[in-house]
């Protein structure tokens, strides 16, 4: 599990970069609400995360269950998506500045809160057939 956790954290850092970059770029679209941008950017991070976690973190690339895995992975990531957007929204209520660094700080804080749920859900639900088998063989 140790190697998986390290790889998961690395993927999480990359996902945070994807999330923040997408959030920033979506924010450049005139009239794009912050909450919509945050939701879309997080979903892009989920898609990025699925690919990296399937093929690298949990080494489930040989599995022929990609549709099922993606559905479970997405379902596992729905609660953190909701938490992410709710935290972002609450931070926006308490910290109302629209300054670039404040907006990115709120987006980053919201992204960080989801990491533990994502790892455990991915390991024990989405990729359990590959992830847990590796533990027993190690």
Image (tube, grey):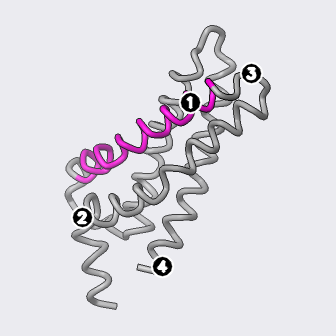
Name the spot of residue 112 as percent of width and height, x first: 57, 51
Residue at 49 percent across and 56 percent down: it is 115
Q: CA distance from mark 3 to mark 2?
A: 45 Å
Image depth: mark 4 or mark 2 in front: 4
Q: CA distance from mark 1 to mark 2?
A: 40 Å
Hey, which quadrant is residue 64 in on the image?
Answer: bottom left
Q: Earlier in the sequence, mark 4 or mark 1?
A: 4
Q: Earlier in the sequence, mark 1 or mark 2?
A: 2
Q: For the residue labelled by badge 3, is the local secondary structure a helix, a strand or a loop?
A: loop
Q: In this picture, is 23 found above or below 32?
A: below
Start-end of magenta stretch: 69-93
As drawn, is 69 to the left or to the right of 116?
left
Question: Disc 4 designates what residue?
Answer: 3
Hey, which quadrant is residue 82 in on the image?
Answer: top left
Residue at 64 percent across and 43 percent down: it is 108
Q: Earlier in the sequence, mark 3 or mark 2?
A: 2
In the image, is residue 83 part of the stretch drawn in magenta?
yes
The quarter of the picture where the N terminus appears is bottom left
Q: CA distance from mark 4 to mark 1?
A: 35 Å
As drawn, is 42 to the left or to the right of 96?
left
Question: Disc 1 designates what residue?
Answer: 90
Question: Disc 2 designates what residue?
Answer: 63
Q: CA distance from mark 4 to mark 3?
A: 39 Å
Question: Disc 3 designates what residue?
Answer: 98
């Amino acid at each position: 599990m140790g190697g998986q956790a390290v790889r998961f954290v690395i993927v999480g850092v990359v996902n945070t970069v994807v999330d923040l970059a997408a959030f920033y770029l979506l924010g450049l679209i005139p009239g794009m609400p912050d909450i919509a941008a945050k939701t879309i950017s997080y979903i892009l991070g989920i898609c990025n995360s699925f690919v990296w976690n399937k093929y690298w973190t949990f080494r489930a690339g040989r599995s022929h269950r990609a549709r099922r895995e993606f559905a479970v992975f997405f379902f596992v990531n729905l609660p953190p998506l909701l938490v992410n957007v709710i935290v972002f929204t609450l931070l926006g209520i308490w910290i109302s500045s629209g300054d670039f660094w404040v907006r990115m700080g709120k987006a980053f804080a919201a992204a960080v809160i989801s990491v533990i749920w994502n790892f455990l859900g991915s390991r024990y639900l989405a990729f359990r057939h590959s992830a847990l088998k590796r533990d027993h063989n190690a």
